[in-house]
Image (cartoon, coloured by chain):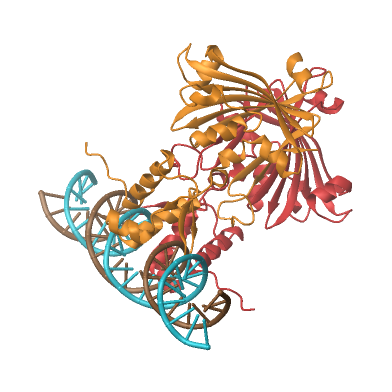
Chain colours: A red, B orange, C brown, D cyan
DNA sequence: CCCATTAAGTTGTATATACAGCTTGGGCCA
DNA sequence: TGGCCCAAGCTGTATATACAACTTAATGGG
């Protein structure tokens, strides 16, 4: 049972992705040029070119002819992140985003939370309960649990200025996400926090996010059904990036 | 103002995508091999290889070492389609799918419908109103409009056996989609068709789909909030296809 | 008739080479 | 000083070549 050798261009890709993941290479940092890889890695330039070109297609790096290759901003790199940050979506449409922290505590994971995060019952997690406002109108209740090991500084972070998703992606790239969307009738607490009418449905997004192969956060995002919707745009791969987002863009849009 | 020439590998890709789009090459058909492209198109084999390899990454074709290159099945080719067909999702989880045709008529597009399909007021469209059942329980009301030019046979198709999305994708690949998800209280007609309790919210998916750059269909899909949810899984690009769906998989899941 | 071998065709990868176009910075000249 | 030009380095593309691995069909021997 010999370990089957990966192709060399894949080894190069893995190497560079590894340096990005472990923080050795940070967003906007310069990645070794093709000729540097030729010398240091003992490959031909075409092989180095293929590795860097595929990393470009996959959103890990950006290349500028004449300048070099640079690690992408996290924002541009992963559609997983596109899907996350309500603060950016609000400011993008020119509105003011504010956030109220209702709860920020350390707990022991039990039941559903422990299962969702794939940790032992009783493992330390942080519990965040935030209300996001768009122009002083509440638009999202964020009920989030974070594995304590992953983000030890979570308990002292001021989430009024930096959203949890921005904070978490700064710690380590979020690499995989699972999302469930439901239409429900909210309980009294959520209804009051979102200033919803009696009987008004809410759109709930339940999201688990992985980093380095392990779930690190689990969130329930409640939105008022009368004021919010989720929009997505799907373009086939190969569509020029300038025209559309690479893969999928999901955002909450006022209507 | 000289037209700037595209790279040759891109010309090859466009050529093959064109032959797939116009029906010259159909799913499972054999695509010219690299060496055939070398001879007929006067390019080097590496250039042909790049074109076919990128078409593989983009899901247009599948390649098998030793056999050749073949046009992908529509199902595997586009995540846009992954997102469409409720019948497949139901049968995939081992349940029985049936469909009741409430309305199947030709109309003149007015107001919202004409705007959504980007056609003149009064243009001919087909209107379909279907109820989809999972094991005799109604799970989706499909209220769909189709541009008549695009699918002239729409009026006589039996949609109890072939869903509209399957029928439409067989006519021409659906290349782009826009989707909006809302939580609403359904009107009486929908509530009755989905056998929903009073005050129960519904999850509504509103979807427009493009083919060859033009909107061809517009659908409102109503689901009972108590019985249905939308799930999505997001994996970073570059993840092996065997592990996860290429890009995004959205499906309705019973709970 | 059956099976093994072989040959041809295909994809997958890797290398060496070449030229075009872009960006930056340094040096030169007026 | 100010502006221009050029060289160096980078990416983007294209070609020719080579070898490995896989698939299929033909071939031939038992």
Q: Residue at x 31, y 51 (%)?
A: B8
User: Left or right: where does residue B150 sit relative to residue B159?
Assistant: left
Q: Position of residue A223 (x, y in %)?
A: 73, 28
Q: Position of residue A2 (x, y in %)?
A: 61, 78
Q: Quadrant of the N terminus of chain A?
A: bottom right
Q: Position of residue B16 (x, y in %)?
A: 39, 47
Q: Position of residue A184 (x, y in %)?
A: 79, 28
Residue B232 lies, with reference to residue A5, above or below; the image says above
Residue D5 lies, with reference to residue A47, above or below; the image says above
Residue A79 image-quadrant placement: top right
Residue B145 appears in the figure: yes
User: Left or right: where does residue D2 sit relative to residue D23?
Assistant: left
Residue B132 lies, with reference to residue B12, above or below; the image says above
Q: B141 or A173, which lies in front?
A: B141
Tag count? 0
Q: Quadrant of the C terminus of chain A?
A: top right
Q: Residue at x 55, y 64 (%)?
A: A14
Residue A158 appears in the figure: no
Q: B27 or A193, which lies in front?
A: B27
Q: B49 or A58, which lies in front?
A: B49
Q: A173 or C2, which lies in front?
A: C2
User: Left or right: where does residue A134 sit relative to residue A75?
Assistant: right
Q: Residue at x 74, y 15 (%)?
A: B189
């Amino acid at each position: 049972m010999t370990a089957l050798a990966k192709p060399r261009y894949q080894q190069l890709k893995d190497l560079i992705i590894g340096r990005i993941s472990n923080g050795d290479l940070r967003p906007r940092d310069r990645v070794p040029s093709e000729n540097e890889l030729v010398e240091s890695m003992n490959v031909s330039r075409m092989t180095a070119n293929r590795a860097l070109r595929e990393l470009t297609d996959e959103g890990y790096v950006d290349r500028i002819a004449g300048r070099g290759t640079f690690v992408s901003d996290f924002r541009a790199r992963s559609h997983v992140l596109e899907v996350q940050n309500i603060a950016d979506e609000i400011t993008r449409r020119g509105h003011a985003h504010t956030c109220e922290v209702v709860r920020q505590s350390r707990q022991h994971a039990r039941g559903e939370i422990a299962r969702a995060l794939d940790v032992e019952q009783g493992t330390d997690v942080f519990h965040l309960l935030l209300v996001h406002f768009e122009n002083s109108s509440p638009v999202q209740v964020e009920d989030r649990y974070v594995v304590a090991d992953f983000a030890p500084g979570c308990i002292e972070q001021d989430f009024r200025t930096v959203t949890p998703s921005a904070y978490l992606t700064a710690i380590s790239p979020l690499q995989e996400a699972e999302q469930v969307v439901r239409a429900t009738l909210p309980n009294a607490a959520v209804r009051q926090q979102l200033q919803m009418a009696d009987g008004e449905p809410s759109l709930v997004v339940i999201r688990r996010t992985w980093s380095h192969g392990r779930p690190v956060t689990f969130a329930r995002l409640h939105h008022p059904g009368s004021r919010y919707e989720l929009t997505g745009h799907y373009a086939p791969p190969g569509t020029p990036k300038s025209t559309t987002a690479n893969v999928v863009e999901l955002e909450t849009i006022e209507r």
